[in-house]
Each structure stands twice: as structure tokens, then as C-alpha cells.
Image (spheres, rainbow, N blue to C red):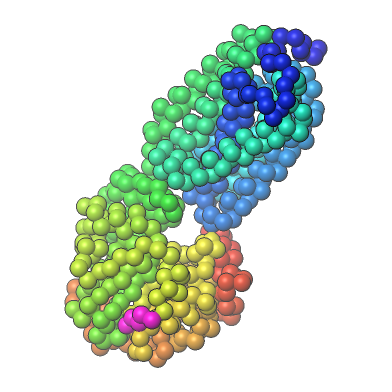
Amino acid sequence: MTTEPAAPLPSATPAASPTTARIAPQELLLLASVFVIAACGLVYELAAGALASYLLGDSVLQFSTIIGAYLFAMGLGSWLSRYVERQLVAQFLRIELLVGVIGGLMPAGLFAAHSLLPPDQVLGFRVLLYALVLLVGTLVGLEIPLVMRILKRFFSERYALKELVSQVLTFDYLGALLVALAFPLLLVPQLGLVRTGVFFGILNVLVACWALWLFRTELRGFAGHVWACLLSLAVLVAAMLGAERLSTWAEDRFYGDHIVLKHHSDYQRIVVTDGRAGTRLFLNGNLQFHSRDEYRYHEALVHPAMAAHGAPKKVLVLGGGDGMAVREVLRYPTVERVTLVELDPQMTALFAHTPLLRRLNGGALSSPKLKVVNTDAFGWLERNGEERFDVIVIDFPDPSNFALGKLYTASFYKLVDQHLSAGGYAVVQSTSPLIARRSYWTVVTTIEAAGLTTTPYHAHVPSFGEWGFVLAGRRPWQPPRALPEGLRFLSLAGLPALLDFPPDMARVPTEVNRLSNQVLVQEFEAEWGKIH
């Protein structure tokens, strides 16, 4: 192989001072291609991290490992670029097409693979995920060094190396900044993960087409490169047109029922399915309730605390944006005011206005007694230190990541204690004492470390299995003398059984979950990971 001839390169304007030279349109387009390359590279990284967090849980772990693997691969690609010495433009063009096709189709491919693989093949999916991340990262790492070497030839008469590096990196970082802002605020909410990946894959291919036209006089096998560009573009356009069908097929397989609602909020992916067995809610792929047995969970969560208080007037619900816990709270005629603190405004909006979901919570989110506050519960408790409640119902998702784990710490429960009235009770949903035994008792130990007296109990919810709750207050809990009429699961005669823990769920020694250690998240991941 011979080196490329330098003569046919597009000519630059005569030498001029870098500070006074005006950037020609052709040069601006070359630098804009750097902007696009950087944007595309970051999108593939973010899409892989978001998809991993949706499908595998623990967003902090997934994003950390994906970003680490991707940056390592980019470094590897940059190192390998030193061995690309000939036909730089042709090599760059091929890399752009590979990045565009593989990176653009990566979210769709991973989504489809996760749906096709058996549920017990999580390891196989992880291997595929990180293999693709490393491949795309290596290709992206090759791009910028090659672009810089090509631009050096093009701008050699106009810019010194330091100015060229400055120009390239400026456009590179600007592209990354724009995408970092647009990805969660615009791209994913409007396009979804699959279409976002394909869209930026098309942009990568268009950069290759631009390079093909600009350097057409020096490329050997020009017709072959044209066909490669056209074929890559056709594949990605077809993927864009079929993205919705692919997403629907993959999600229907994954969730097992017909999807009637799916929504990307700023905080999570909300999916509601409806089938012969009933309606189910999933947040980031994790089941939150099934309409056929959610009453068991919510009756067990709410009534032991509410009924034991006797005459609760002010009630605080933390989490529970679906309105099911509020529905149970409103069974008590003494209740004058309910405050619901839910981080995600999309959750409360969907369950307040969607007819199917309104029927499930009995229109509870439209009650005149209810005040909805869409904010972080930890911060809200800190800012509202003077307000006291007779009952506090804590219905957060399981502590599968550090963002959720902070809501199960001793610091958080001390704030809860500050908001309890003298005779008040708090109740916490606390994962499964059977599957996640150490996690459950870690919650109990942590609440006790905050100075509260605990009453652990559990209930069987078929969709989840044995599920745990913890009652807490400044006084020992006493069984109520009466329960509201119309309950389908809870009864006075059945209450003592909820407090009985057989040997395989009995208490074990555990540490206190603190903001400084987050041991609960580690315990939870270890215990629930065993069943996957």
C-alpha cells in the first residue's frame, strides 16, 4: 500500500495570521463534523448507561461501570490510532460508518437481546452489553486522533498545531455539553432510547458522506465507498422507521402483557400493562404493583398504623405517587389533611388523570383533602421541620441504588421522628424478609438507631411473595380495636400472624445504614442478585 497523494486535497486560502484569518465555510463544516462526532460518541455512552439502568437496575452502578468501560475503550482506541498510518481519510470514513451503524443500532440490539434471552441469562446480556460498549468506545477513540491528523494537513498553512488542537477540542467539548443537556431533557423524552441511538447513528454516517465528498479526489475505490455510505444510511433509516414497532415488540415480550401506557419522565421509565390477569405498573422495569393483589400490600402498609392511632387527622405519605396508599388513608373519616410527597410529577399526573389508573386508586389523587408536593422527600423533611403528623406512610421503591438508599438511612429516620406527633406512628415498606432477609433487618436496625421503637411485620402478596413492613413510633405499637369496613385482606383476627416470623425470616444481626456507608444498598444488591 502507498501513502495518499497530498496534492488533490481541497485547497486552503493563503497563509494568514491565525488571529486575523476568517474561517472559510468549508473549514467550518470540517470543525462542525468534530462537534457532531463528539455528540454522537457521548450519546452512545449515555444510551448504554440508561438502557443498563432500565433493564438491570441500580442506575449508579450501571452508569459508573458503563462510563468507566467506555472511557477505557476510548483510550484504547486513541492508542491504536498510532498504527493507522496510510489512507487516513479512507480509514476515517470506514470508522465513521462502523460507529454510526454499530453505535446507532446498539440500543435497539440490546433491547431486543434482553427480550429474547431467558430471564436467567443476565450474565449473557451483561457480556453482550460490555462487549458492545468496548467496541463502540474503541471506534470512537479512533475518531478524534484521525480527524486531527487530517485537519492538520488541511489547515497546515493557516494554524499552528496548538491552535488546531484548541479548535478541535473546543468543538469536541461543545458537542459533548450540548448532548449531555439534551439527552435527558429532550432526546429521550421525545424520541426514546432506540430512536435517539439511530438518529445519532445517521449523523455519524452523514459525517462520513461529507468526508467522502470533500476528499473524493484522493479516495481509491470511490464507488465502493459510495455504496458503503448508501447501505449504512439505508439500514439506519429503516431502523428509524421500524423503531416503534421494535420497541413495542421487545417491551411486550419483556413485560408479558400488552402495554397500555409508557412514559419517560425526568426520573424514571413508567410502563403500565393490561392483560387478562389485570393491570401492572413497572418503574424502570421493576414491578410496583399488580391490580389483582395490590390491595393486600396497601392494606398491610397503611391500616396497622392508621387504625392503631385511633383518630388520625394529619397524614403524610412519602412516595406512593400511584395514589393507592392515599386511597387507603382516606377510608378514615377523622382524616382532615393528607400530604403526598412524590418526587416525580409525571407519576402523580398520570394516576390523577388517566381513567384506567384513576379507577385503581379510586380517584384518591383528586380528593380535596389531599395536597401533592412534587419534590425530594429528604429535602422536604429538612425544610418543613415544624410540621407534625399523626401517621407517616413511607412507600419508597426498594433501596436498589444510592439515591434510594439515602431514604433508608438513620439520618432520614431521624427526620421522620421529628415530624411525628407525640402519639404518632410511621410505617415503612421494607422489602422481602424472605428473599432479602439481611436487607429487611438492616432497615429495622436503622430505624431503631434513630431512636424509634419498632414493630416488624410481614404479609404475603402473591406478586411479590412475603413482603416486609416496619411500624415505628415513640411508644410501643398496640393492636387496633377496629379496622375500616370493606377491607379484603386485613382483619383483627389475622393481625397477630403478621407479627410472627418463622426461622427462615427471623432476625439476624445487621449494621446501621448510614449516609456514610450505605450498607443497605450493598446488602440488597447481593441478596436480590442471587435470584437472577
Residue closest to the eye, 5 or 83: 5
Location of residue 275 with respect to 150 vertically, above or below: below
Which SS does the magenta portion mostly show? loop
Left or right? Give the position of 369 relative to 466: left
Residue closest to the eye, 236 or 109: 236
Left or right? Give the position of 201 relative to 278: right
Left or right? Give the position of 473 relative to 359: right
Location of residue 220 with respect to 43 vertically, above or below: above
- Which percent across, then down, holds residue 277? 29, 53
Task: Tell me what residue is drawn at x 34 percent, y 71 percent.
Answer: 317
- Which percent across, then down, holds residue 230? 53, 16
- Which percent across, then down, holds residue 178? 53, 40
Residue 389 located within the stretch drawn in magenta: yes
Residue 240 located within the stretch drawn in magenta: no
Task: Tell me what residue is drawn at x 57 percent, y 74 percent.
Answer: 514
Left or right? Give the position of 167 relative to 227: right
Task: Tell me what residue is drawn at x 50 percent, y 72 percent.
Answer: 408
Task: Tell me what residue is drawn at x 74 percent, y 19 percent.
Answer: 15
- Which percent across, then down, holds residue 395? 39, 68
The range drawn in magenta is: 386-390
Q: Work out whether residue 314 can be spotted.
A: yes
Write down the quadrant of residue 163 in the picture: top right
Location of residue 190 with respect to 487 vertically, above or below: above
Q: Quadrant of the N terminus?
A: top right
Q: Count up the numbered dots.
A: 0
